[in-house]
Amino acid sequence: MIHCVPGAVAAFAGGASVMKPGTQLSEAGGMAPSDEDLMARVREGDDLAFRELFERHAGAIVRYCAGFLGNAARAEEVAQEVFLRVHRARGRWEPRARFTTWLYTIAQNLCRNEARRPERHLMVEAVGPDGEGGSREFADPVASTGDEHAAASELEHRLRGLLAGLPPAQRAALLLSRAEGLRYEVIGEVLGVSEEAVKSLIFRATRSLRAGLKDLMGTGQ
């Protein structure tokens, strides 16, 4: 099971260090092939290289899609389509841009198309007490009281609803930055906007989330 979280708590909690996408360590401790090197091999028909790219990025793409769509099941379906499109387009791949920029651009376009479908209005997935449905709770795994667990579940449910209510560009910028650890430059390339616009999108999204969670977080402005 691939864990999916809304990925935006870090927006008002200070953020956590995230390894840059495509940076991988080999089992021997050295640097593994870059995403671009692997994609070049995929272009030549190397299915093992494609499998490595999939294993390297599938979890992050599912997490991003889940945060954007608010539904873990649909996120996995969309993520599968992302990698199908990567494989179909392998012959046209040119290493003029970062692989992750290309990958997240495909994911972003598919998520926005999915969200526009009239029968697929954004749904906020309620997380059960055992985290079923591919979602991970924010609760401390050693928490022992029902009140603590209920508060964590309410926080996650509220957060999913707030994310779903953000304008698509704000939602995408926030998730790509806070959940996926992409630099503003890369996010701008994915969204087709300037770095300053990315900063503005993230600021507005963060402000909206803080306002919506103020009663639960016990914070001020």
Image: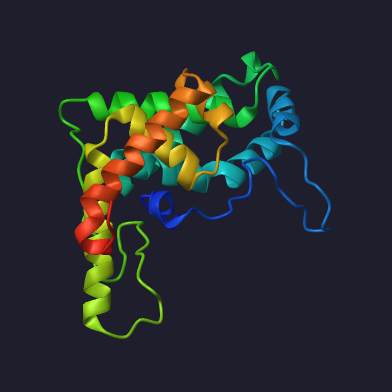
The spot of residue 72 in percent (x, y) is 32, 48
Out of 85 and 138, give the one closest to the viewer. 138
The spot of residue 33 in percent (x, y) is 77, 40
Residue plotted at (16% across, 26% down): 118
Residue 148 in view of the camera? yes
Quadrant that contains the N terminus: bottom left
From this viewpoint, which residue is outermost toward the front?
Answer: 221
Residue 75 in view of the camera? no
Residue plotted at (23% across, 24% down): 116
Out of 62 and 157, give the one closest to the viewer. 157
Residue plotted at (41% across, 39% down): 174
Q: Quadrant of residue 144?
A: bottom left
Q: Quadrant of residue 98?
A: top right
The spot of residue 67 in percent (x, y) is 35, 44
The spot of residue 156 in percent (x, y) is 28, 58
From this viewpoint, which residue is outermost toward the top?
Answer: 92
Q: Quadrant of residue 62?
A: top left
Colour convention of the picture: rainbow
Out of 24 and 152, give the one closest to the viewer. 152
191 vs 211: above or below: above
